[in-house]
Image (cartoon, helix red, strand yellow):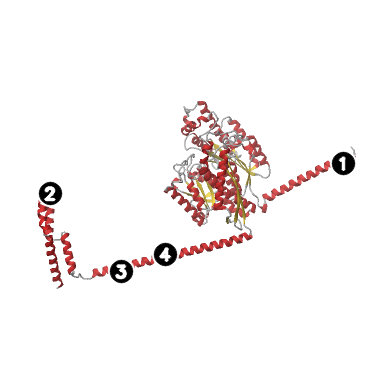
Amino acid sequence: MTNKSTSRYAFEFYSIRVILSIFFLGALCLSATVQVRASAGNQAYPQAIFIPLDDRPANHLFPAQIARIGGGSLLQPPDNAIGHAYKAGDTAACAQWLLEQAAQGPKRTAIASADMLAYGGLLASRTAGLSPEQAIKNLAVLRQVAPQTSQLCVFACFPRLSLRTSEAQAAHETALLNWARKASYANLQFSKTVPEKISQEYMAVRQRNVKVIEHLLELTQEGTIKTLILCADDSNKEGLSAEEQQKISAAIKDKKLADKVKILNGTDEIGMCLVAGWLSKYWNCHPALQVCYSDLADLGQIPKLESKPLHTTVRQHIDLCGAWDVAGMSSEVISSAAILWIETQSEKPYEAPDTAKITEEDRARSAKLGTSLRWAKANKRRIGVADVRLINRADPILAETILDDIELWDLEGYAAWNTAANTIGTVIPQMTAHEIARTCGHTWDQTHRLESEKTQLAFTWARLLDDYAYQALIRPTLSDMVKGLPRDPDPLLNKYGGAGMSARQKAIDWAASVWQKKLKGRCYTHPNFGTPLFLESYKLEAVLPWPRVFEIEARLDLRLRPLNAAENRAYREQQHLLNTQTQSEQQAAARAKKAAEAYKSQRDASRLQKDQGFKEAAKARSAQPNKPKDRDQSIGEAVGNLFRGGDPTQKKEEEAQKKNKTSFFKDPGKAIQETVDKWTPTVKDIGPAITRTVKAAGKTATETEK
């Protein structure tokens, strides 16, 4: 080997060493950065592994936002692994990713959707083609990953009544739904309007999914799964879904798994609830909630598309989130709890109120909610609103009441989408996570505190944008634009592009109006920040996440920062002036009220004095002896008696007439003639009669005076 060659190889070796040194130094710096970010201020922040049900916002985006509000973060599979819309997720890729994440670093909590791991997502779980054996085989990863996690929480779905098992079955989907609502496994007779092959395919999917749930019970019994949540997706209080739930409930009881396995209404909200429960356990913080219903008569109501009473759904979701209900506790405990306001379901939940013709009932509901919001603010109580009045949309009257009567940063949570369980299971996790931030956030660094607070405010604003503005105002305008479009269109043709652009622009316009009216340039105080927080700017991106108009995905990025020292001084001076002005107005109002009360008191005293004077005068008159009547009074009374029947002659005639009044009915003609004959002299002589009466009365008065 020549010197030249030796030099060349030496240079290449040196270069490799330099490159490797730079690489390892970079890795070391990155590791140090991660360490600092993970434990800044000697504070560790929780991180969980999360396998979503699918890529819809409620299952993919919302849980991550709940985690950020509560000071944590989620690791989720890449988008290409969980599928999109009607394309199923890659079960093998999800399983491999789960194993890789569990093997890295310290043991962490893992929250996994069994439907994603077994079938490829919620919609895939409703289709035929995958055998029970293959679905159970896909879940083998749970046994592999469990030892490498601190706890493994799994959620799985009962099949709903309406299933799209295949394209051939699509034409019979409604007929099968109506049949399954009343069918029974005890006497299973297929519908005569549906081909038997299609009915058998439908039943095969249902039975396969139930077998998978039974396998999950076995994994829970052996200790692989620490917590198993079974979701009743769009269920019914009777029919096949109800019997399947009863069967699994009996198995839970037999295996003595009631403390580890729960059956809940709802599906899409369960990921959020499990994330909130994980945060509660990590921070050892279990928020107290006071549940208030708009109508107590609806506590036992079973909402549409569900199989359990409303109060049961609320209680189960509170428990799952790691919070607790203060019902029955002392007044001191209740007064410190956050308020969860449940607007109960309408008798016609599919019919939105006509905002152009607001009824007295609408006004009463609005006034009741508005009063509760203002009372909570005045008494320094946090409050969140779960509006389950309508299916998959907010009550527009109540939403406007919220926008008018409370600041968004004072609203602990809000939702009004799809079913009652979906709404309730969104508000409770949000309230739980924010209560954790308020309680434990003072120990976090400013980056995490700001991230938590801006995510909380953005989440609330986005819920109003999606559940109210989009569902109640924007979505109805898109119906004609998507009418007749296929459910799974070619993405290159962008057939939903027009509807998506229209929805996006209208959503942006609505958000801009809220920003201008309620948020722009505003400041508010927060217990975890030394200075008020300033709302500086925002960015919004709104899209249709799937080729349909069922929901909108709103990603809001708020610029929120604490005021600096100079800004804080200016803010305090402004607040002082406002408080002084408010105090002056309050004092003026108090003076006016006091003057009005003094005037009323003086007026009442004057009236009482006059009444007392009248009573005393009357009493004095009654105590005096009777005085003789004067001349004019005697004459007047005598004349009056004449016309009132006071003349003695007239009285005798009246008495005679009363005695013989029955004669009129015996002989009417004779009775009338006799009456005319008797009264004729009286009528003719009325003048002289008056004269005689006056003279007689005058004479009597004169004699009395003498």
In this figure, which residue is indicated by the disc labeled 3? 613
Specify which label sits upstream in the sequence, 1 or 3: 1
Q: CA distance from mark 1 to mark 2?
A: 154 Å
> Which residue is located at x 83 percent, y 41 percent?
12
In this view of the protein, can residue 396 be seen by the observer? Answer: yes
**What amino acid type is highlighted by mark number 3?**
Gly
Q: Secondary structure at mark 4?
A: helix
Q: CA distance from mark 4 to mark 3?
A: 26 Å
Q: Position of residue 209 (x, y in %)?
A: 55, 33
* Mark 2 in CB contact with mark 4 (< 8 angstroms): no
Specify which label sits upstream in the sequence, 1 or 2: 1
Where, quadrant-wise, is the N terminus in this rendering?
top right
In this figure, which residue is indicated by the disc labeled 4? 596
Specify which label sits upstream in the sequence, 4 or 3: 4
> Which residue is located at x 34 percent, y 66 percent?
607
**What amino acid type is highlighted by mark number 2?**
Phe
Q: Please, is residue 145 above or below residue 576 in the view? A: above
Where, quadrant-wise, is the C terminus in this rendering?
bottom left
In this figure, which residue is indicated by the disc labeled 2? 664
